[in-house]
Each structure stands twice: as structure tokens, then as C-alpha cells.
Amino acid sequence: MASNAGTPPTAGSPRVLVVGAGPVGLTAAHELARRGLRVRVVDGAPGPAPTSRAVAVHPRTLETFDQMGVVDGVLARGRKNRAFTMFARGSRLVRLEADYRSMPTRFPYTVVIGQTETEQVLREAVARLGVTIEWGVRLTSLEQDRHTVRARLEHADGSAEEYEVPWLVGCDGGHSTVRKQLGLPLLGESSETWALADAEVSVDLPPDTIYWAHTGSQALMMVPYRREGYWRLLDTAPSGRTEGAREAAERFSEKLSAGLGRPVRVGEPDWTSVFTFQQRMVPRMHEGRCFVAGDAAHVHSPASGQGMNTGIQEAYNLAWKLAMAARGQAGRELLVTYGQERVPIGRKLLGSTRKATFLVQFKNTLAGVGLPVAFTFVRAIGPLRRAIQRKVLGGMSGLLLSYPESPLTTPDPLMPVPAGSRAAAAAARHPDDPGCEALRAELRDTRWSLVWSAGGAGEAGRVAAAAAAAHGTWLSVRTVHGTDGAGTGAGPGPLADPEGLLRSVLGLGAGGWVLVRPDGYVAAGGQELTRRVLARALAPLGAPAMLPDVIRDAERPVRVSPQLVLAAAAAASAGAIGMVPVLEPSSTASPELRDTVETSPRVLEGTR
């Protein structure tokens, strides 16, 4: 039932202009196109960036790439990192190993990969969906009203065009024209100047960890690439003057040797950059029919490697909401939740990166003396070391990000899986179990997922069948059953759980249910699936998402025959690939399904 390919766009599909072809813009374009929208991507640069600022793809972003269907390309090009090792004045302080036991994930590591290679994976993915990137096309201004956005685009040959489009997404970086045109202020403060370099490094240390080295007065970092002998180097206190490649190599060699306590020879860098990073963000992330994401919405220190990862998460959050609203599957109020969910995360990110920046820099001389003493206790006290590991990893990984306060979240204190949390955590509890693997595959679907456990004497089966029949274009309904035959044929979209482990991790008794958003976060769930509780969970989507009246009350029970179940399952499956945009009673439908539709004119409300 799950579909990676999504819905192919048609001539009448809604259009979106994405400004910026970096990792954030490419993610937005991919997910919009995967949901059947026609996407135009423009970028003022003459071509793809030749150098990388971001080099870390964290676990939650890897989960997102898995759901997008592109994670294998990233893993093939990167190096898995599972440790963070600290040195001070030549002595090793501590090696912090990755510990994700309290944050289950299929990807318990950070992948070190140049941003250029991440972008290449994403460019190939959007090309497979028929999206072409227009390089050398710069947005110079925009206007909008209640119905459309009018963008002025300037081409490399000097020609200009006026492009009218219903929606626009600005992913055009820290100097975003879209942000400026919308009048969104970038609030915050400037901070430190750092230097980056990619170079070949000769050192007798294994490339299986990120290294942090304090010289006694300042700190540096080394991050190993997949390419043998090549590292990303970060200097937190560069000289502040222009220097050549050889001089930069000598400076890095001298400082790293002092911090690591062994000879280090740095070759002339392939690329260097000295920049002053900032800690700034916008107070809101959309204005009318225009949205901003990534560096267009916030800029901050690279200390914890969060910039690109956060932007990708934002684009992923926005794309499914914009697609549903554009296709009439949800109300405009759904779009408001983009900023409601992501602005608070941006604020927290600024706070955490300030702390990370302070910890990475450690500029004062006393830090070089006190650190060995402090980490003697960390090494000796196992629980303290593990607590630090979980704290550091939790903040960087993105795995602790959740939406418990979102308008889209319907909490239930009896739910074993907290509303607002990652459904991927449940899928990772038992990675070799077929039921958990089936949930992981389900998370790759572009639609909402309603997972319920067959059995029981309530109305769950009728609700599941009617929901699948009415809303298969945007709602995937999956019925969990076991090898004992319990629940087999009792609902649409059978999802095998032979060992019962999936039902266990989701806390599903007979008739229990979990509703998962298209971005993989749990929206709601409960002990018994009824029309009332499901309608309440879907209410934030707006009127088009209302459930059919056919199951409104117990006085009008609906017969759920095998034919109806098969028809509902077929409708949901066809909806996944865009073959059934609207269900109508027809001569080919089963008598039960035709009777259901005809006796309730509103059964298909929201699919038109």
C-alpha cells in the first residue's frame, strides 16, 4: 500500500515556485512533486555550489531521507560517525560513544558527507520526478494578493519575465530576497568569525570519530570524510587576515599538533572560507501565499551542524501541508501550523547553538587547564558519561524533536506512543521484525497513515473501511493482524504483524489505533477507533477532511462485507498512485459500496 513514487503531476495540478536549489529547496521540490504538484525551481547561481559548508546529516534527517526514498544515496557517499573525542594540550580527555538506546532509530549515527554530495543525491531524486532546475534565474521582486503570487524573474542573459503562480517557497539562503520582499525581519545578533577548510591530513588517529582539540587558548575541530585521508577542519579563532593555501595549511598543522599532542601535517586545502556567523531568525515563516525555510528563515553557528538539517526538516514539514491545501484536501488553517510548529523549534535551536558555540570555542586559557580535571570525573563515572552522551546526541540528532503542543496533535494520556512523537521510533524498536519493517515502509507513503488493530466488537472496522473508501487519496488505512488469522480480512490495507511486536510497541489492543502525519509524527491514537475520535483527530485539517456520515451513528449500522473491504482497499491503493482522484458510485462497484455511497450523499465529502 505504501508508495514512494507518490502522485504524478498533471496539467491541472497546482503550481509552486521554489526559489533556491540548495538542500532545503530541493527537499521542498521533491516532496511537493511527489505529491502531484507542478514545481518550478529557480536559482540565481550559474550552477551547483562547488564547495560545502554543511558536512553532517544527523539521524532524524536520515529518517526523513528514508521516508523520501533517498537515504541509500546519502549513505553510499558518506562516512558513518559514532563518536566524539576530546583532546586538550596534547592529552586525550574523553571519547563519547554514540548511545541512542533511549532514542531508537534505524540510523544510530551521523553521516559525514559534503553538502555538495547531499545536493547531488537530491538533484537526481527531483530529476526522477520530472523537475528541472533552472540555474542563472534570479528572483528580483514579488507581489501577492489573495489568489496568486507574481514573481519577477531575471535570467542570465538579462531578459526578465513575470511569473504568476499560486504558491511560492523561498529557500534562497541567508541573504534571501524572498524574506526581504515579504518584509520579514531577521532578528538576533552577530557573533564569532570562524574558518573552514577541506584538506588532506596526515595524523596517527583513526578516522572513526570527530575530534575536538584545545591548544590551551583556543579550540579546533576535525571531521573525517569518507574519502581516505581527507578531513573538514574548523578553526574557532582564525587570524582575521587574508592568507594563502600554504599559510592556512601551516597554521592548521601547528594548532592541531599542539592540541592533539602528536605531529599533524595538513596539506594545502582544496577549499577555505572565513566567515562571521550570526544567530538570527524570523518571527514568522509565512506571509500570505509565500513561505520561507532554511537559512532564509534563520542563520546560526555551525557548531552543532544544525543549519542544513533544520532546513530540511522545515521543508519536509511544509511540503505535505502545502500540497494538501493546494489540492483542496485540507483547509488553509493547516498552513498556519507550519510556523506554529517550526518557529518555536527555531528559537530553541538558537539557544542550543549558542551553548554549543561556547563549548566548542572555549577560548580562555583556564579552560585548557580545567578541562582535564573535569573530564577525569566524566571518564571515571559511567552514568555521568552516558548521561552526557545522551544529552549531546539528543540535541544534535533531532530525534527528540516532537510536536506535543501542535494544533495537529490530539493527546491521549493512555497512549503508549506519545502524540507528537516520531513514529519511526516504534518502527526501530525491533528492526528485524516484519511488523516493524512494514511500519517503516508505511512511513514512506506520501499520505496520512491510520494504523489500527483488527478485532473487538466495536465500530472500528466500519470506521476504517469507510475512511479508506472516502479518503484514499490522502489517507492510507492499514489493518494490523497476526498469523493466527485474527483480523484477517476485517479491514483495508492488511499489515502483517506475525509476532505481535508492532502491536506491542504501538500499544494496540483490539480496535486500537494510531494516526500518523505524512512527516512521520504521531498525531493521535487511542484504545478504540470510532468515528467521533477520528473526526476529532482530523478536525484541524479543516472541513474537507470530515469523515462520511455513513458511520455517524450506531442506529444506522453499515454492513461490512468482504466486498466492501476489498473495494475500500482498492480505492486506498489506487489513491496512493493518483489513479482515483474522486470516487463515484458506478456499475463496477460492489453492491455494498454503491449502496453505501448512494445512501449518504456526503460520504465522499472532501475528496472532490
Image (cartoon, rainbow, N blue to C red):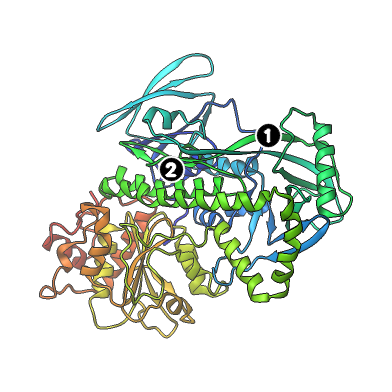
Kindly identify the amino acid type of the residue bearing the numbered disc 1. Answer: Val
Which of the two marks, 2 or 1, is nearer to us in this view? 1
Count the marks.
2
Q: Can residue 597 be seen in this view?
A: yes
* Image quarter of the N terminus: bottom left
Closer to the camera in the image, 54 or 379: 379
Q: In which quarter of the image is residue 71?
A: bottom right
Kindly identify the amino acid type of the residue bearing the numbered disc 2. Answer: Ala
Residue position marked by numbered label 2 in the rendering: 33
Residue 396: percent from the left, percent from the top? Answer: 57, 57
**Residue at image coords 51%, 51%:** 351
Closer to the chain start, of discs 2 and 1, is: 2
Residue 191: percent from the left, percent from the top? Answer: 58, 39
SS class of the residue under badge 1? Answer: strand
Furthest residue to the front? 366
Residue position marked by numbered label 1 in the rendering: 274
Q: Residue 238: which numbered mark, if any?
A: none
Q: Can residue 224 be seen in this view?
A: no
Residue 274: percent from the left, percent from the top? Answer: 68, 34
**Residue at image coords 44%, 52%:** 345
> Badge 2 local density, few (<14 within 10 Å), some, or many (20+)?
many
Residue 91: percent from the left, percent from the top? Answer: 82, 60
**Residue at image coords 41%, 54%:** 446
Furthest residue to the right? 263
Q: In which quarter of the image is residue 456?
A: bottom left
Closer to the camera in the image, 260 or 377: 377
